[in-house]
Image (cartoon, rainbow, N blue to C red):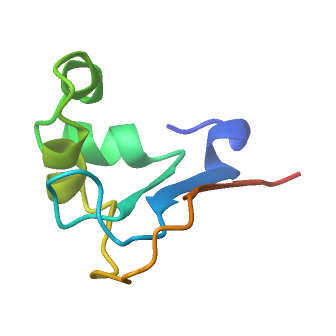
Amino acid sequence: MLSAREREIALLAAGTDGSDGPTDAAGAFVDGATVARGRALGLDARLALRENDSYAFFACEGGTFRTGPTRTNVMDLVFLLRGG
């Protein structure tokens, strides 16, 4: 079960160019339930981080943020929303 603190947090990290390295993802969205959703699918978030493979984790978990190419590369953006 998620704590109140875990339920009230969300983060989006993405590049304005619409891709992250060689992938089709601009970034990823996470919230307090991301790890639990991944675990329910048989995924291990810590292992994905350790192996530098967050793309595979988020592609299966559902947090991949895809915009397609924007043809503008201004910066990387990180948005954090915290409730309460």
Q: Return the residue found at the far right.
A: 84
Compared across the picture, whether 5 is left or right of 1 comes to: right
Image height of 25 relative to 68, above or below: above
Q: In front here: 10 or 26?
A: 26
Q: Residue at x 35, y 40 (%)?
A: 36
Image vertical order of residue 46 relative to residue 43, above or below: above
Q: What is the tally of numbered marks visible in this picture?
A: 0
Horizontal and vertical percent position of residue 19: 29, 64
**Observer-nearest residue: 48 or 74?**
74
Residue 3 is situated, as x and y percent measured from the top left of the image, at 64, 36
| Residue placed most toward the observer, 65 or 43 | 65
* Quadrant of the rendered image containing residue 40: top left
Occupied quadrant, residue 49: top left
Compared across the picture, whether 83 is left or right of 25 comes to right
Q: Which residue sits at x=56%, y=67%? A: 74
Q: Quadrant of residue 52?
A: top left
Residue at the spot x=26%, y=64% of the render?
Answer: 25
The outermost residue toward the top is: 50
**Looking at the picture, does residue 40 appear above or below residue 74?**
above
- Identify the residue at image location x=23%, y=36%: 39
Indicate the position of residue 62 as horizontal and vertical percent values.
26, 62
Q: 52 left or right of 29?
A: left
- The percent coordinates of residue 11 (x first, y second) are 58, 53
